[in-house]
Amino acid sequence: MLELPREVTTNIPKITIIGFDQLMIENYKGVIEYEEYLIKISTSIGIVIIEGTKMNLNQINENDVLISGDITKIYLENTEED
């Protein structure tokens, strides 16, 4: 039986960090805030907060968003209810 990754069969986000200058979020819901120093992305399990400088939304479509810039901090804010 073929086992599919959890993020494919559910709406759980997958976050990929590439060095200190790129971040890919798959299965996101929307962009909450976009500034040169701060980006907030809504997901099914919470909010991803990315801080840095020269932040850009390089690629954005209905399934994933690619963020670039000088990333200094990444926070995950849990908004799921128990």
Image (cartoon, rainbow, N blue to C red):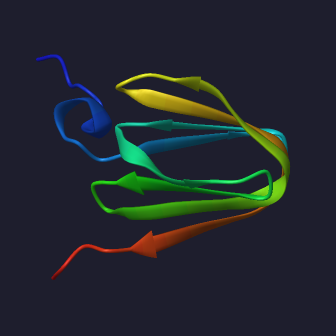
The residue depicted at 15 percent of the width and 82 percent of the height is 82
**Residue 77 placed where, x, y %?**
46, 74
Task: Judge from the rendering whether residue 23 lies leftward or rightward of residue 47; answer left or right.
Answer: right
Is residue 82 placed above or below 59 in the rendered structure? Answer: below
Quarter of the image where one finds residue 59: top right
Residue with the most extreme left position = 1
**Residue 2 placed where, x, y %?**
17, 17
Residue with the most extreme bottom position = 82
Is residue 55 placed above or below 3 in the rendered structure? Answer: below
The residue depicted at 35 percent of the width and 25 percent of the height is 62
Q: How many marks?
A: 0
**Residue 40 placed where, x, y %?**
55, 58
Could you say which is closer to the camera, residue 63 or residue 82?
63
The residue depicted at 18 percent of the width and 79 percent of the height is 81
Could you say which is closer to the camera, residue 1 or residue 9?
9
Could you say which is closer to the camera, residue 55 or residue 28?
55
Task: Judge from the rendering whether residue 34 lies leftward or rightward of residue 43; answer left or right.
Answer: right
Quadrant in which the N terminus is drawn: top left
Task: Judge from the rendering whether residue 60 lies leftward or rightward of residue 79; answer left or right.
Answer: right
The residue depicted at 38 percent of the width and 42 percent of the height is 28
Could you say which is closer to the camera, residue 66 or residue 2?
66
Is residue 41 placed above or below 80 in the rendered structure? Answer: above
Quarter of the image where one finds residue 46: bottom left
